[in-house]
Image (spheres, grey):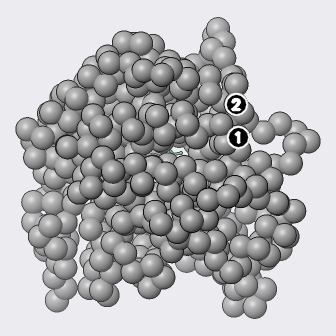
Amino acid sequence: MSRSYYPKSFLWGGAIAANQAEGAYATAGKGLSISDVLTVGEGRIRRVTLDVEDNQVYPSQVAIDFYNNYDNDIRMFAEMGFNCFRLSINWTRIFPTGFEEEPNEEGLKFYDRVFDLMASLNIEPIVTISHFETPLELVRQLGGWDNRDMMPHFLRYCEVLFKRYGHRVKYWMGFNELNNVIKIPYLAGGLFITEGENRNQRMHQAGHNMLVASAHVKRLMDEYCPNAMMGAMLSLSGMYPATSHPEDVLSAYQMRRNSLIYGDVMIRGDYPAYAARLFETLGVTLDIEEGDMELLKNNTVDYLSFSYYLTCAVDHKTEMAADTGGPIGVDNPYLEKTKWGWPIDPIGLRYVCNELYDRYEIPLLISENGFGARDTFVDGKIIDDERIDYLNKHLIQLNEALHDGCDVIGYTWWGPIDIVSAGTGEMEKRYGFIHVDKDNDGHGTLKRTKKKSFDRYKAIIESNGSALFE
Ligand code: BGP
């Protein structure tokens, strides 16, 4: 008979990003971020317009209006029993273009209110400093993170956050899914790469600059809030060889390193031995400035947070497709998929926790895991049994990982309330335990309704995992 291995101190909650939830894109002095000029995709790739065009739907601009509904929404999270909530600060609320010398007080006040409310409900904030919300003006003028001139503007922003919120936020992370700069470079690294440009060079240089920036951020955090913890945040959905063909096994191993390289630098403090050949193969020459390596060595992170949605199967002859949930490979005949083609693999979560804990031996936080699906009302209710099944099975496997000895400190379900999809811009790719009345064209009342999964997650949290075994 299985039992719960979730420790008493376990952080149970959910995660959102400002750009996918807040809306109010031009309120109280906020400037445009890179997400505010992304169109809706509906299965197709979202288009970056680099300016606001007429007759386009830009889903992030209104999103679910969390900006005006945060009080109600966070109280609903508290009702589910959340003792933590991961959110990002919208850089452009604090520095509208990124270039200002002084922060926008109105923007800072918004997060004061959010953190006050969370404190009153005993919800621990987990804060992402940059989650696909780079100021558009910085990108227009500097071209994104392959330009080191981004650094002072970012660090000025971070310093303001540590000074203002350092006494109330213990868990921080710098860049969301830093390793995605080589998969979804516009969102993750503010890189707008046009045809004919040296894509690999730009992406990997941006990756290096962001690693250096992250080390600076950790240094600043230690200075302003020595009791806080800094996490790496990486997209680490799992990866298997498609067959036991040695070429597939080797390809899967090498491909995994394309992501682990970022963990290796942030956690071990240096580029791993395989990095030189990787860059050589890609024709990349990194511009590493004097002092960079020492900074990286002396400012490693305290914990590793990661997103896990799926596993992919690597066939050495087939090119992988990039998606927000992780790379998509060839079909794995043992796994079912979501409507968006993401393989569902609860055991993969146990596998990845063990893989990462074996490698790094620092606390792990699963900062994103979730199930994007279409929901329908029947007699005024949403009976989302598939989402419940995904939740149960992943948490049972996470329990196995805890039993295996992995030090996992928390789990934040991605999108506990329906929000805009980062990859496609759709509202109807829903993750929430709470439904929001809004469609892909931006129509709807924004009314919130609990789904069946709301009570299920509540029961799991209330019992600290024991309900999974009843
Ligand atoms: C991750 C991002 C999130 C999120 C999630 C799900 O890459 O950190 O912002 O949205 O993927 O992806 P999607 O929204 O495309 O379904």
Whole-percent x and y of residue 177? 52, 54
- For image coordinates 37% across by 75% down, the residue present is 362
Of residues 139 and 218, the one nearer the viewer is: 218
- Using the rendered image of the protein, determine whether residue 170 is visible from the camera's viewpoint: yes
Of residues 359 and 288, the one nearer the viewer is: 288
Query: Residue 427 has which mark?
Result: none
Q: Is label 1 in a helix, a strand or a loop?
A: loop
Q: Is residue 384 above or below residue 334?
A: above
Q: Is label 2 in a helix, a strand or a loop?
A: helix
Q: Are there few (<14), some (14-19), or many (20+) residues within 10 Å of tag 2? A: some
Left or right: 8 as drawn, with respect to 168? left
- For image coordinates 76% across by 58% down, the residue present is 286
Q: Which residue is mark 2?
A: 142
Of all residues, the one furthest to the top in this rendering is: 54
Of residues 196 and 61, the one nearer the viewer is: 196
CA distance separating discs 1 and 2: 6 Å
Q: Is residue 273 above or below residue 215?
A: below
**Quadrant of the image occupied by residue 425:** top right
Q: Are there few (<14), some (14-19), or many (20+) residues within 10 Å of tag 1? A: some
Labels 1 & 2 near each other (Cβ < 8 A): yes
- Kind of residue sitting beneath label 1: Asn
Q: Quadrant of the N terminus?
A: bottom left
- Kind of residue sitting beneath label 2: Leu
Whole-percent x and y of residue 437? 34, 26
Left or right: 448 as drawn, with respect to 31? left
Q: Which residue is mark 1?
A: 147
Mark 1 CB lies closer than 8 A to ligand 1: no
- For image coordinates 87% across by 43% down, the residue present is 197
Q: Quadrant of the C terminus?
A: bottom left
Whole-percent x and y of residue 158? 42, 39
Whole-percent x and y of residue 135? 55, 27
- Using the rendered image of the protein, determine whether residue 453 is visible from the camera's viewpoint: no
